[in-house]
């Protein structure tokens, strides 16, 4: 199993989050990179920290993007 390098902080019923999932799925599959979604509403600390600033993409725990995920930028960051 591939280690998750990408964490998507999101919430349900969020159209920006849905769009981020599609980009992340495509890029992660192409590069063989693991990823995991995390529901900020399921964790009071995350909800307090990120509030309505979702989606947020973390790469190896470091914030990469918020609100929108650009496919080429994500790919470049993962290739490092």
Image (spheres, rainbow, N blue to C red):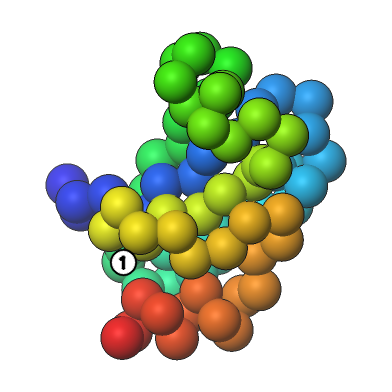
Residue shown at the point (35%, 59%) measured from the top left: 62
Q: Is residue 23 visible?
A: no
Foreground residue among 56 and 48: 48
Lateral position of residue 55 relative to residue 74, left or right: right
Lateral position of residue 9 relative to residue 59, left or right: right
Residue shown at the point (47%, 36%) measured from the top left: 37
Residue 60 image position (x, y, % from top left): 27, 58
Crowding at dot 1, Cα within 10 Å, few <14 / some 14-19 / many 20+, comes out as few
Q: Count numbered badges in the picture.
A: 1
Lateral position of residue 76 relative to residue 23, left or right: left
Residue shown at the point (56%, 23%) measured from the top left: 47
Q: Which residue lies furthest to the front in this view?
A: 48
Residue shown at the point (79%, 25%) measured from the top left: 13
Residue 73 image position (x, y, % from top left): 55, 81
Foreground residue among 38 and 31: 38
Residue 53 image position (x, y, % from top left): 69, 42
Foreground residue among 77 and 63: 63
**Is the residue 23 above or below the residue 35 in the image?**
below
Q: Give the residue at mark 1.
A: 32
**Is the residue 63 above or below the residue 52 in the image?**
below
Q: In which quarter of the image is residue 63?
A: bottom left
Residue 72 image position (x, y, % from top left): 59, 84
Q: Quadrant of residue 17?
A: top right
């Amino acid at each position: 199993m591939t280690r998750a390098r990408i964490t998507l902080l999101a919430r349900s019923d969020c159209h920006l989050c849905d769009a981020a999932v599609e980009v992340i799925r495509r890029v992660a599959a192409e590069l063989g990179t693991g990823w995991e979604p995390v529901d900020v509403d399921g964790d009071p600390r995350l909800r307090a920290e990120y509030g309505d600033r979702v989606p947020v993409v973390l790469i190896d725990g470091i914030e990469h993007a918020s609100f929108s995920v650009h496919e080429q930028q994500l790919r470049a960051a993962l290739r490092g």
